[in-house]
Image (spheres, coloured by chain):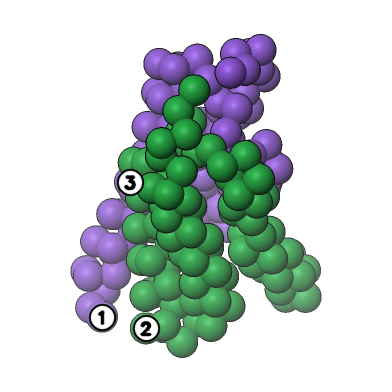
Chain colours: A green, B purple
């Protein structure tokens, strides 16, 4: 792969990663329900994002840090929503 | 960071990433319900895992490729479950 192709794929990946949890946040907000989401999965994804955020900051890899800061923020919102809407059981 | 610390963090990250969707797969299997999961989010995560899997194979970065192959497999199972259990609406 050429360097330009790699950078283009990297930017595309960063945008896709950053946005990936946005539809989930909007869906929970709309339905006020997050019962089907697995809390261990959300916590593992958040731990993973926090790890990459730390790694990105230590290595001065800002695109990595920013992408994972956005993902971590959305995951924290999902955790908050899961707590907030926990009583809406069927 | 020393090289050993970096490798240790890398292995920890790979294991956490690989396992992160397992609790979600088990939860859907147990409850037969995946209505609250956002399909666009799952598809974006799957596209992201497929991209990293391809990148890992092109770069001969096997830990990256294997981690993302496992994540992609679990995400495909979740997509299948979401389709299979779609009638279990409240």
| Residue shown at 33% from the left, 46% from the top | B15
The residue wearing badge 2 is A58
Looking at the rendered structure, whether the residues under marks 2 and 1 are on a common chain is answered as no
Q: Residues within 10 Å of mark 1 (few under 14, many from 20)?
A: few
Q: Quadrant of the N terminus of chain A?
A: bottom right
The residue wearing badge 1 is B1
Label annotation for residue B16? none
| CA separation in Å, label 2 and label 1 | 9 Å
Left or right: B26, with A73 as reference point:
left
| Residue shown at 37% from the left, 75% from the top | A54
Label annotation for residue B15? 3
Q: Residues within 10 Å of mark 3 (few under 14, many from 20)?
A: few
What is the secondary structure assignment of the residue under circle 3? helix
| CA separation in Å, label 3 and label 2 | 21 Å
Left or right: B81, with A4 as reference point:
left
State whether residue B67 is above or below residue A76. above
């Amino acid at each position: 792969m050429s360097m330009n192709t790699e950078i283009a794929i990297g930017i595309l990946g960063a945008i896709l990663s950053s946005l990936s949890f946005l539809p989930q946040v909007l869906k929970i907000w709309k339905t006020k329900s997050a019962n089907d989401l697995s809390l261990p999965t959300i916590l593992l994804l958040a731990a993973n994002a926090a790890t990459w955020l730390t790694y990105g900051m230590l290595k001065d890899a800002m695109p990595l840090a920013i992408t994972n800061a956005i993902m971590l923020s959305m995951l924290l919102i999902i955790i908050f929503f899961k707590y907030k809407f926990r009583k809406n059981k069927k």
